[in-house]
Image: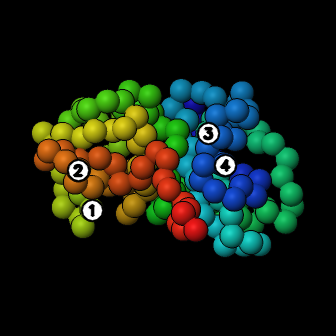
Amino acid sequence: MSTVHLGLSLGHATDSDAEHWLAGHLPAALAVPGLVACTHNVPSPHPHVALSFEAPEGAILPEMDPALRAAADEAAARHRTRVSGRAVLFPGADALTGTLTAADILDLSAIERITILGGTDATRDTTIETRDFVRPLFRSGRLELVLVPIVGGRFAPFEVPNPTPCCADH
């Protein structure tokens, strides 16, 4: 089956808003095995989060505001060239729960590289506490998961599931 890269910009304010839309409004034509869906921070016509999809040829996206078309096209181009994009849906994502080794993650999913913040590659036996929330990034043409050290010599994905908003206590 041939695939195409599509962009969709609905003006979501945050990655979380875009993910909630994906969870509840993903068109049936896109809900297929192998789908890759990413979020992208785009600057125009105002800062917001756009979506990109590597989808089956012929997939149709919902209508969007024509003023957001350029942002959608930018997201699709970034995905196609694999220079950026935060993968929310990707092959094997559902299997990345609990504590796994880097080898498990590489074997079970479309993730192609695992690095520790700062650029060091993780070893295949690196223990990773997924927190059931894995959001790899397209970087330099590959889908890469970035880790941070946590307690006990383990690692976890850099992005946390429920981040505290900046200045939340003010």
x 54%, y 63%: residue: 169
In this rendering, would 128 be left or right of 11?
left
Q: Are the two marked residues, 3 and 2, in contact with CB atoms closer than 8 angstroms?
A: no
In this rendering, would 156 be left or right of 3?
left
Q: Amino acid at mark 1?
A: Leu
Q: Which residue occupies the extreme front position in the image?
A: 170
x 85%, y 66%: residue: 67
Residue 53 visible? The answer is no
How far is mark 1 from mark 3, CA to CA?
30 Å
Residue that badge 1 annotates:
117
Residue that badge 2 annotates:
150
Q: Is residue 69 above or below residue 145?
A: below
In the rendered image, residue 131, in percent from the top left (x then y), is placed at 37, 38
How far is mark 3 from mark 2, CA to CA?
36 Å
x 29%, y 53%: residue: 147
Residue that badge 4 annotates:
17
How far is mark 2 from mark 4, CA to CA?
27 Å
Residue that badge 3 annotates:
55
Q: Nearer the viewer, mark 3 or mark 2?
A: 2
> Within the image, what quadrant is residue 120 found in?
bottom left
Q: Nearer the viewer, mark 2 or mark 4?
A: 2
In the rendered image, residue 81, in percent from the top left (x then y), is placed at 50, 60
Q: Nearer the viewer, mark 3 or mark 4?
A: 4
Q: Amino acid at mark 2?
A: Ile
**Secondary-structure class at tag 4:** helix
How far is mark 3 from mark 4, CA to CA?
21 Å
Mark closer to the chain start, 3 or 4: 4
Structural crowding at the residue carrying mark 1, measured as other residues with C-alpha within 10 Å and reported as few (<14), some (14–19) or many (≥20) = some
In front of the other: 87 or 162 = 162
In front of the other: 48 or 113 = 48
